[in-house]
Amino acid sequence: MALKILLLLTLLAYSIIVSQSFMYLLALKNTQINLPVNTYIEIRKLIDINMRKKFTYVVYGALLSNLLLVIFTAKNPGSLLFIAATLAFTGLVADTALTLKGNMPINNAINTWSADSYPDNWADYRTKWLVIFQYRQMANIIGFVILLIGVVFGSK
């Protein structure tokens, strides 16, 4: 029963993280690319404020629950569920590292801009942010799919 609860918590937290990636694939990337500079700055700032307030807890929850899942399933290191949990955790760690080292510094720079004062190469910041986010998408989508495979085919 404890394993099932841990699986549920991990899947729930991970699904919230991966939902951001899927929304960017479906619409948000193209939307941001087509925004004029002033609108882009304001939206980016508002998204960043809200993500820092709320999404941080989701990331901590996903990392903690996934780590506990790895520890809980480590007694069967050859099992599909242990391997999937380990790979999924690796995806979350990669996503988090890319966020902290890549996207957050760009967000910090954008947060200093105003509608009247922004660099001439503002679109380069946006492009760099989106490129880093694409690597994050790969990490968390692959990790989530592997976790789903482990849960569906590797749990009892």
Image (spheres, rainbow, N blue to C red):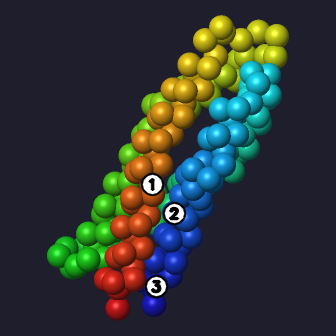
Q: Residue at x 74, y 21 (%)?
A: 37
Q: Is 101 situated above or below 156?
A: above
Residue type at the position of mark 2: Tyr
Q: Residue at x 61, y 12 (%)?
A: 121
The correct choice, above or below, for 153 with respect to 42 in the image is below
| Circle 1 Cα neighbour tier, 10 Å, few/some/many (<14 / 14–19 / ≥20) | many
SS for tag 1? Answer: helix
Judging from the image, what secondary structure is the residue with disc 3 in? Answer: helix
Between the C-alphas of marks 3 and 2, the distance is 15 Å
**Is there any visible trace of residue 111 in the rendered image?**
yes
Label 2 residue SS: helix
Q: Amino acid at mark 3?
A: Lys
Going from the N terminus, do you reach mark 1 or mark 3 first? 3
Image point (31%, 61%), residue name:
87
| Residue that numbered label 2 is attached to | 14
- Amino acid carrying label 1: it is Asn
Mark 3 Cα-neighbour bin, 10 Å: few <14, some 14–19, many ≥20: few
Q: Measured from the top left, where is residue 126 in percent x and y?
A: 60, 26
Locate residue 96, reporting x and y percent: 46, 45
Q: Is residue 33 left or right of residue 151?
A: right
Residue 100 image offset from top left, x and y in percent: 49, 35
Q: Which quadrant of the structure image shows residue 127?
A: top right
Contact, CB < 8 Å: mark 1 with mark 2? yes
1 or 3: mark nearer the eye: 1
User: Which residue: 47% across, 49% down?
Assistant: 137
Numbered mark located on residue 28 in the image: none
Q: Nearer the viewer, residue 120 or 67?
A: 120
Foreground: 131 or 68? 131
Identify the residue under disc 1: 140
For label 3, the residue is 4
